[in-house]
Image (spheres, grey):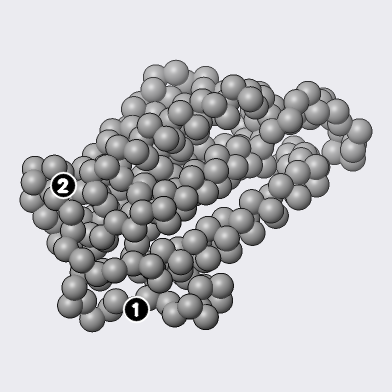
C-alpha cells in the first residue's frame, strides 16, 4: 500500500509541475477544436452528393457503422492497460502516467488543430448518412450557436472530413504503445504481440472507416502521414519526459527534471 501511495504522490508532483499545459490542452481540445471548429464546419457544410472516391469503388458499403467503433474501442482498451501499468509494476523505468498522458494529449491537440485548418479551408461534401440530402437528422448550428453549442461524444457532425480524427487518434495509440510498452514490460514476445495486434486492428479500421462511408480515402491517407510525421517531429524536439529521482521519498518535493515534456 505504501508503494502505491508513493506512486500516486509522484504522479501528483508531476501533475503540479505541468498542470497549466494540461488545463490549456483540455480547454483547446474541448472548446476551441471540438466546439467552435466543428460547429463552424457544420455551419458551412452544404448537402451534396459525395465525391468520387477510389475506396468507395473498391469496398462495398457497410451499413452497420458501429463496427468502426468496435475496432477503436479494442485499441483504447489496450491503451488504457498500458497507461495504468506504472501503478502495477515496481520497475517502471521512470515512466509515469502523467507524462505519458501529456505527450499523447499534446500530439493529439496539434493534430486536431491541423485537422481543423484542413476541413475549414475546403468544405468537402460529407459522406455519412446523416449528412446526405434528405436526411431527417441533419441539424447544423445557426450562426449564434457556433460558440455555444456543445457537442457530446454521440452528437453527429458534418463538414469535418479532412482528415480523419478517429484514425489519427488511433495511430497515436499505436505509436504510444511502441514508445512506452518496452519500457514497462520485459516480456519482449508479449510486447511484440500487443504492438503488432494494435497495428493490425488500426490498418483494418482504416478500411472499415471507408466501407461504412465515414470518411473518404484521402482522409485516411492524410491522417497516416500527418500523424506519423508529427509524432517523430515531436520526438525529435522532446525526446524525453520530465523525470523524478528514482529513490525520491513520498514527501520529497525537491525533484529536478532532466528535460521538458
Structural crowding at the residue carrying mark 2, measured as other residues with C-alpha within 10 Å and reported as few (<14), some (14–19) or many (≥20) = few
* Residue, disc 2: 53
Task: Answer with left or right where residue 137 lies relative to residue 89.
Answer: left
Q: Is residue 235 above or below residue 43?
A: above
Give the residue drawn at x 44%, y 35%: 227
- How many numbered marks appear? 2
Whichever of callouts 2 and 1 sits on the residue coming sooner in the sequence is: 2
Give the residue drawn at x 28%, y 78%: 137
Spatial separation of the CA atoms under disc 2 and disc 1: 25 Å
Q: Is residue 216 visible?
A: yes
* Residue, disc 1: 139
Describe the element under mark 1 as helix, strand or loop: loop
Residue 254 x/y as whole percent = 91, 33
Residue 185 x/y as whole percent = 53, 25
Task: Work out which residue is located at the far front of the displayed protein and give it.
Answer: 121
Q: Is residue 97 visible?
A: no
Task: Answer with left or right where residue 146 lies relative to residue 95.
Answer: left
Amino acid at each position: 500500500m505504501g508503494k502505491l501511495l508513493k506512486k500516486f504522490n509522484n504522479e501528483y508532483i508531476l501533475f503540479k509541475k505541468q498542470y497549466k499545459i494540461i488545463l490549456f490542452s483540455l480547454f483547446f481540445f474541448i472548446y476551441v477544436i471540438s466546439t467552435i471548429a466543428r460547429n463552424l464546419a457544420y455551419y458551412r457544410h452544404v448537402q451534396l452528393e459525395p465525391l468520387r472516391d477510389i475506396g468507395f469503388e473498391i469496398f462495398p458499403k457497410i451499413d452497420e457503422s458501429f463496427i468502426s467503433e468496435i475496432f477503436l474501442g479494442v485499441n483504447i482498451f489496450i491503451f488504457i492497460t498500458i497507461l495504468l501499468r506504472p501503478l502495477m509494476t515496481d520497475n517502471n523505468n521512470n515512466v509515469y502516467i502523467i507524462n505519458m498522458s501529456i505527450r499523447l494529449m499534446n500530439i493529439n491537440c496539434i493534430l486536431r488543430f491541423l485537422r481543423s485548418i484542413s476541413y475549414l479551408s475546403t468544405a468537402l461534401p460529407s459522406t455519412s448518412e446523416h449528412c446526405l440530402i434528405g436526411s431527417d437528422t441533419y441539424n447544423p448550428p445557426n450562426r449564434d450557436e457556433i460558440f455555444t453549442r456543445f457537442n457530446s461524444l454521440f452528437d453527429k457532425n458534418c463538414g469535418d472530413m479532412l482528415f480523419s480524427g478517429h484514425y489519427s487518434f488511433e495511430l497515436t495509440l499505436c505509436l504510444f504503445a511502441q514508445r512506452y510498452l518496452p519500457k514497462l514490460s520485459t516480456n519482449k514476445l508479449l510486447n511484440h504481440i500487443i504492438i503488432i495486434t494494435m497495428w493490425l486492428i488500426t490498418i483494418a479500421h482504416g478500411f472499415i472507416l471507408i466501407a461504412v462511408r465515414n470518411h473518404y480515402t484521402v482522409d485516411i491517407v492524410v491522417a497516416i502521414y500527418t500523424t506519423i510525421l508529427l509524432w517523430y517531429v515531436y520526438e525529435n524536439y522532446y525526446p524525453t519526459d520530465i523525470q523524478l529521482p528514482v529513490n525520491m521519498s513520498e514527501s520529497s518535493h525537491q525533484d529536478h527534471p532532466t528535460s521538458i515534456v
